[in-house]
Amino acid sequence: MPYLKCRNALCIACLLLAACQRQHRDIRPSPTRLAIYGDAAKEDALRPGGRVNSQPVVNNPYNASAYDISEGQRLYNWYNCSGCHFNGGGGIGPPLIKKHWIYGGEPANLFDTIVKGRPNGMPAWGGRIPEYQVWQIVAYVRSMNGEQPRSATAARLDTIQTNPQTIVNRTTGPTK
Amino acid sequence: MKRTFVAGLLSTLLLWPLGAQIQNQPDDGQWPMAAKNYASTRYSTLGQINTSNVASLKLAWTFSTGLTHGHEAAPLIVNNTMYIVTPFPNYLYALDLTKPGAPMRWVYQPDPEPSSQGVACCDTVNRGGAYWNGKIIYNTLDVQTVAVDANTGKEIWRTKLGDINLGESITMAPVVAKGVVLVGNSGGEFGVRGWLAGLDAESGKIKWRAYATGPDKDVLIDANFKPFYSKDRGTDLGVKTWPGETWKIGGAAAWSWISYDPTLDLFYYGTSNPGPWNPEQRPGDNKWSSTLFARRPETGEAIWAYQISPHDMHDYDAVNENILLDLTINGQPRKVLAHPDRNGYLYIIDRATGEVISAQTFGYVNTSEGVDVKTGLIKWNPTKQTGYNTVRDACPAPPGVKDWTPSAFSPKTGLIYIPHNNLCYESQATQANYISGTPFVGMTVRMYAGPGGNRGVFSAWDPVQAKTVWSVNELFPVWSGALATAGDVVFYGTMDGWFKAVDARNGRELWKFKTGSGIIGQPATYKGPDGKQYVAVLSGVGGWSGAIVSGGLNAVDGTGALGFVNAMSDLGKYTTKGGMLYVFSLP
């Protein structure tokens, strides 16, 4: 009995700790975090004979937090990422739910892709999206591939809502 | 001067014998423009291949384009040369038909901007070119029109017409009428301001540009503009039917087909959906989106317009082909155009005035309940209005009962052969933010098969009786063009890769051949230098419907490719990508 109690306490402590991470949010992103990006995120070195993961020096400072991932999801729609990549399946742009990434799928690669753009149609968002928001979008994109703790991952919006009035206010009446 | 005039008059007379019906176009066995002729009949008078011998049709030769995006173009055949326009990067191949196996004479590479691929809504397709006075004229994805010497492959001129950073691109095949190249932009999903431009065919200089939104002077509407219906009359409707200044990003692109009637001196084309798809952000009729226009080629001046789908809530556009026909309807000879619209109605319209003679559904429709030919108004079904409320089982889906896939008309049978879809959808609008050069849609969509479960249909329509004569169900949407011939054989291709020949009178399958990839191209036929009839088609799946394969999309997200992925999740089990030309003849 005492053992069980102890284990329960441990579990609760663990859950609380996990919940801390889950709920972590940066109210004012620190300048050091904003200055992380640069050319630190390198693409794979050219190595004959197989993939070598020489990645990456930079970690996403907005990782594993449900708040940041859900913010990332909101921003993913807000900045029209969804316009081309939809809810991860792709369309105009390539899918984001996948194993093999053209320019690397590590957080630093994704950050670079968003900030600098890519030649076949991906716009460069550097200077248009604040860097902490780019990291939040990176966190969300990673979550689509199961690369974030499940407890922090938001559901993708690829279903049609049954009762939309609960989430959006109608701005106009029926139009015709 | 006088001689030119007489020669011009003579050729006009030769081309237009008195009293001839417009559908009986002169035919020299070549294929000089995507739609074959100005009337857009896609009908060839060649009859060597006919219902009794087509079963023995054999592969004559092939040609790989080396590209893997959707191949929607029609091959052109002029002076014993075949010209192929590819999807991005928009190569132009010239193949020598006088030699065995048709070896390549030259390839022209226009080198369009790679980033233009990011503003192509529905794969990086191109629908082909036009031959004019020793030149092949076509468009590149990055909003340029080029003219290439048909003999040498050298560039003669190129004209930049728009800006990919505004979301503009071009995928359509131009038409040259009276020495004016007619070109329109794409980008109804990117908040462009739609236009159609007229370029001098010899110099590439822009003569005029007609916008589809904005004040009348920009739309090239003046005193000669006489719409048939009062709903389309008024001043500056391209401004007044939009909230605020949203007409500036309202879409209404001209990304598809153009027909031309030299006698009336009018050309016809339709404009695209309004942007964004989310209709709650743009209350009003949204003129001149989803509208048919009749204009003069030399000035661009609008003569009439008919808005087919006012306040288009379903991405129906009005861009589908207009087949020009002279028919006797209810005992009266009528100069009409036949327009199978995405909204599901096949419109027969007086092409001199814009009056709707009939508009009957040619597939399953529940988003509307008929078209009143007295007022020209479509009666939208209020229970299928899209918006922030979820709407389910709305039919047809955004690609319509039929998308860009061009029909053919046979003067022998009097029937229109229509490649089309059977798709329904569910949707919910979201707030669309305008960010220049990115999509402006605001609609979550999932499509699926319509009643019966087959996603495609190929059918024959009687434009006089306004009814379907026969139809063939297909597994996938029929995304290829149709070709009709004097041999009473009609050709089309399927997305699972079959190229089919059917009997023009009853739809009975007479022959089929399995190509390497799904077919979304436009078949053409011609007389070779050896006097034999050949049939050519590009295979190479892609386009909006085939993006799941050509773009390697992930079927786990049904909303992908504007919701088309949901309906096409199994396409990858039936076909792989890869562009290849197939040419057939009798042994």
Image (spheres, helix red, strand yellow):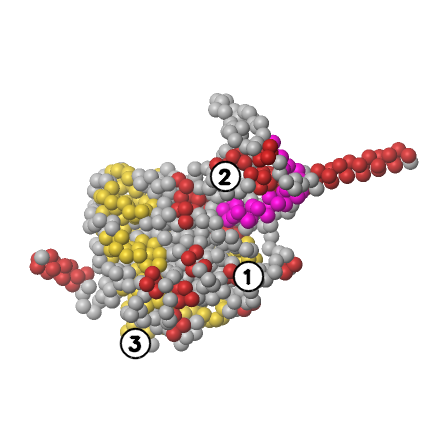
Q: Chain of mark 2?
A: A
User: How many residues crowd mark 1 within 10 Å: few (<14), some (14–19), many (20+)?
Assistant: many
Q: Which residue appears at 32% of the width and 71% of the height?
A: B226
> What's the residue type where badge 1 is placed?
Gly
Of residue B372 and residue B311, the one placed in the foreground of this image is B311
Q: Which residue appears at 40% of the width and 76% of the height?
A: B374
Q: Which residue appears at 73% of the width and 39% of the height?
A: A20
Numbered range of the magenta stretch: A59-86
Q: Are marks 3 and 1 on the same chain?
A: yes
Q: Quadrant of residue A107?
A: top right
In this view, B7 is above or below A102: below
In the rendered structure, are the residues bearing label 3 and label 1 in contact, judged by CB atoms less than 8 Å apart? Answer: no
| Residue marked by disc 3 | B332
In the rendered structure, are the residues bearing label 3 and label 2 in contact, judged by CB atoms less than 8 Å apart? Answer: no
Q: Which residue appears at 41% of the width and 70% of the height?
A: B359
> What's the residue type where badge 3 is placed?
Gln
Q: Chain of mark 1?
A: B
| Residue marked by disc 1 | B387
Of residue A52 and residue B161, the one placed in the foreground of this image is B161
User: How many residues crowd mark 3 within 10 Å: few (<14), some (14–19), many (20+)?
Assistant: few
Q: Position of residue B560 (x, y in %)?
A: 52, 48
